[in-house]
Amino acid sequence: MTAIVSESSEEHASVLEMIELLQIDVLEEEVLQGKPEREHDPFSKNVLRKQRHWERKLAARKSKRKEEKLRRKLNRHSEDMAHPQLSKRIMKAVTKERLAEARFSGLKVCIDLSMSHRMSDKETSRLAAQLRRLYGSNKRASKPFHLFLTSLGEDSRLLAECVRMNAGFLNYTMERTEQSCLDIFPPENIIYLSPDAEEALERVDQDKVYVLGGLVDESVQKTLSLCRAKEAGVHAARLPIDQYMQKTANSKNFHSKILAINQVFDILMAVCDTGSWTHALDKCFPRGKGYEVAQHGHSTCES
Ligand SMILES: C[S@@+](CC[C@H](N)C(=O)[O-])C[C@H]1O[C@@H](n2cnc3c(N)ncnc32)[C@H](O)[C@@H]1O
């Protein structure tokens, strides 16, 4: 009995209630058996027996409640694993944190959109899709880059298309400006990437800004980005495809070194992650372009 009395006040109340009911039970039984009504004796054998019975029941109920609590906890855990809403929420917070951090310490990569008026509507839509993929890669990266979209007019066809095609575009964690990349970065820090540049990019340097030409040229407008770099008087470089890759035989004898901006972005990301052009090109260079990594690439160029 002492043990029961020391339980929580809720349990205490329910035990007292049960005892009262038991006593009524016993008295009713005695009346039915024709025994004379007597003064209520809380320590009669019958009452004590029933009290012990209820004590056992109460203890069983308590351990059942404990088991139930544990079961619910385990269920919650396995639910998290099966429906990872919770882990999704955590991942979202981690991504947000990483992108915010990239604004201070990430490698600066800029998409120069000053030439977007030279594209058709179809090319504009394709560029909007490439920007979405590029942003997706950055979001998934363990060390994202600090992204800039420059010369993106507020009333431009490209911005309207990005908003139409890419959910949440205006909330992407990146810098978006109408200003030119040439106005916001010191020219000596700019490396303009162009497939037509003479020089091959050897290393990716944290102090530089890597500018990609925001262009999709289905009707190839050759050397556009190289001309832009030359006019601005900034350094231009191409990916070191010749140094690390060789042509593959294919039925159409097709070989192209011109990649989409998101593909160039993925290669830059991979080279920063692994420090190896061989790995980066092997992993990210699109198979359909008619090139493969050469067995003996120039490892001297690895950053
Ligand atoms: C589809 S390409 C545009 C090609 C266009 N003819 C030009 O003049 O740049 C889009 C951008 O990706 C980058 N790019 C594509 N392939 C490249 C390569 N092999 N080396 C360096 N940059 C490349 C360049 O910044 C280029 O402007």
Image (cartoon, helix red, strand yellow):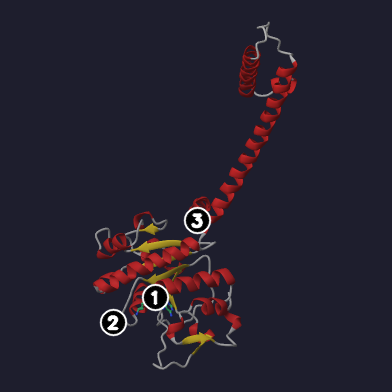
The answer to which image quadrant residue 216 occupies is bottom left
Distance of label 2 from label 3 (alpha carbons): 37 Å
Q: Position of residue 264 (x, y in %)?
A: 44, 74
Query: Where is residue 95 shown, x and y percent of the image?
Result: 50, 56
Q: Which residue is mark 2?
A: 219
Work out whether 193 lies above or below 35: below
**Residue most toward the front?**
34
Q: Front-most of 267 and 208?
A: 267
Residue 266 visible in rendering: yes
Dot in front, 2 or 3: 3
> Helix or strand or loop: what does disc 3 sit on?
helix
- Mark 3 lies on residue: 95
Amino acid residing under circle 2: Ser
Q: Is the residue at mark 1 in contact range of ligand 1, meaning its CB lies under 8 Å from it? A: yes
Q: Residues within 10 Å of mark 1 (few under 14, many from 20)?
A: many
Left or right? Give the position of 1 relative to 244. right
Amino acid type at circle 3 is: Thr
Ligand 1, seen in the image, is in the quarter at bottom left
Q: Are marks 1 and 2 in contact (CB under 8 Å)?
A: no
Q: Secondary structure at mark 1?
A: loop
Spatial CA span between label 1 and label 3? 24 Å
**Label 2, residues with CA under 10 Å away: few <14, some 14-19, many ≥20:** few
Horizontally, residue 157 falls left or right of residue 30, namely left
Q: Mark number for residue 260?
A: 1
